[in-house]
Amino acid sequence: MNRISALLLCLIFLCGGSIPALAEMPNQHVSRAEALYFIVESSSLLRKRAVFHAENLPPVSLFRDVSQNATFAAHVEATFEYGLLPGVADRLLYPDQPLLTESALALVLRLHGDRSSFTRNWFHLRGDSRDSVSFHQLLERAKQQGIPLPTLRMGQPITWNEFQMLLGLREFSTHPFRSSKSFAIAMPTLGIYDLAVTHPNDPLTHEGLIEPLRMGVGHLFSYPGRGGNILIYAHSSGYPWDVSQYTHIFRQVNRLNKGDMIYVTYDAGVYEYQVTEKETIPAYDIHSLQDGADEELILYTCWPPDSVSQRYLVRARPVPRSL
């Protein structure tokens, strides 16, 4: 893979690239290659190694059925390097085959440090399996490691939801603050749930910025999972004639305290943020909104209520993911 391709791979990671089936079809089956790809994408350490391998792929692949031009070739190298992907005598990965339940359990156990021949053999399971003894051994090992276990069926392809639960990541249908909206925010401390977030069609005019506030709250700058500042803005007060339910939505935003949780649904995922600080700034202070070194969620409103003399900011940082 050339340097340009490697840089494009970096951009995919930077922008929170993901496998479309994960966002759109949580009950779809996971292929063996997709499972490795997703594990790498979920780990900052493995992502860095995949970027390295993308620029330094050897001419011969580890597996005979994986082309070095495949989009997941660098992911195969990274997972093999860290002992997650075990080798096999016939050098066949079967990347397009569905990941069976037993193989998924073996792979997740290897993530938790079980690099035994038992997990190696079950990841490279060939054909159909009806070995109930070994299946229950895999389940028991997973329980001992504290791995969350959905209801799994022996010898069956695993779905995205099931695989994601095994990894301990965000699960689509069960997160208590997941919204059916494509972009929404929940702040339990304030009693705010399922509040629509809308990016303005015309963010360069006053009218354009105000338009999203008729339906909920507005959004500027970056998006969850992409780094940089994610600005969510809303009214703390309004004109007497404006009786919209959203006119005072941020009137009590100062009740949020350090450590309080904020949940943002975006692109089929739930992103968790924890309040780190809050501050009052002059109305024309734009320096406080400039990007820092890491991703940050900023709630922004006029302050104090019934005044436009200042602005109130609540800052929150992402809660680290488990991988």
Image (cartoon, helix red, strand yellow):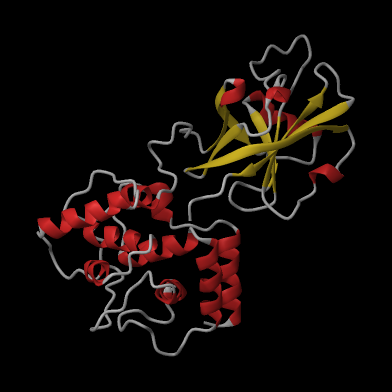
Q: Is residue 140 above or below residue 237?
A: below
- Residue 111 seen in the current view: yes
Measured from the top left, where is residue 59 in percent x and y? 44, 90
Measured from the top left, where is residue 139 in percent x and y? 23, 52
Place residue 79 in its image quadrant.
bottom left
Q: Residue at x 86, y 33 (%)?
A: 281
Measured from the top left, where is residue 234 in percent x and y? 71, 28
Left-right relation of 165 to 264: left
Residues 243 and 73: in front is 73
Measured from the top left, where is residue 175 in percent x and y? 43, 36
Residue furthest to the bottom in view is: 59
Residue furthest to the front in view is: 144
Q: Residue at x 57, y 44 (%)?
A: 319
Left-right relation of 168 to 43: left
Place residue 251 in its image quadrant.
top right
Residues 112 and 97: in front is 112
Q: Is residue 189 above or below residue 98?
A: above
